[in-house]
Image (spheres, grey):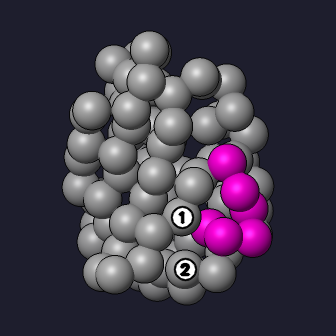
Amino acid sequence: MKTFNYVITDEVGIHARPAGMLVKEAKKYESQIMIKKGDKQADVRKLMMLMGMGVKCGEEVTVEVTGSDEEEACAAMEAFFKTNL
């Protein structure tokens, strides 16, 4: 399992457009990708779960990647977060 923490810098937080892009990016990999904030967690491949977390600007999330391509998937997710969120 690979993990990284990230503080959301997008002023609107994880909203519809970047969430949709994140789901699309996550579906490129076989590994399970979960995002956690406090006691909430969501599968990054499920848009409604992701949106339901209500992640806002300045909040820290933890992303966990588990599976056969976790190294590649984790690096791609971290790059996505830094570029888009």
In this rendering, does residue 51 appear at all? yes
Q: Where does residue 14 sit, x and y in percent of width and height?
A: 57, 71
The amino acid marked with disc number 2 is Met
Residue wearing tag 2: 53
Say which residue appears at 25% left-offset and 42% top-offset. 3
Look at the image and give the residue range highlighted in magenta.
45-50
Count every numbered label the image shows and give the total: 2
Residue wearing tag 1: 42
The amino acid marked with disc number 1 is Ala
Marks 1,2: beta carbons within 8 A: yes
Q: For mark 1, give the secondary structure.
A: strand
Separation of residues labelled 1 and 2 (CA atoms): 7 Å
* Labelled disc at residue 33: none
The secondary structure that most of the magenta stretch takes on is helix
In this rendering, does residue 79 appear at all? no
Say which residue appears at 30% left-offset and 59% top-offset. 62
Q: For mark 2, give the secondary structure.
A: loop
Is residue 33 depicted above or below 48 in this figure? Answer: above
Q: Where does residue 7 sit, x and y in percent of width and height?
A: 29, 66
Say which residue appears at 62% left-offset and 67% top-offset. 50
Q: Is residue 39 left or right of residue 15?
A: left
Residue 25 magenta-drawn? no
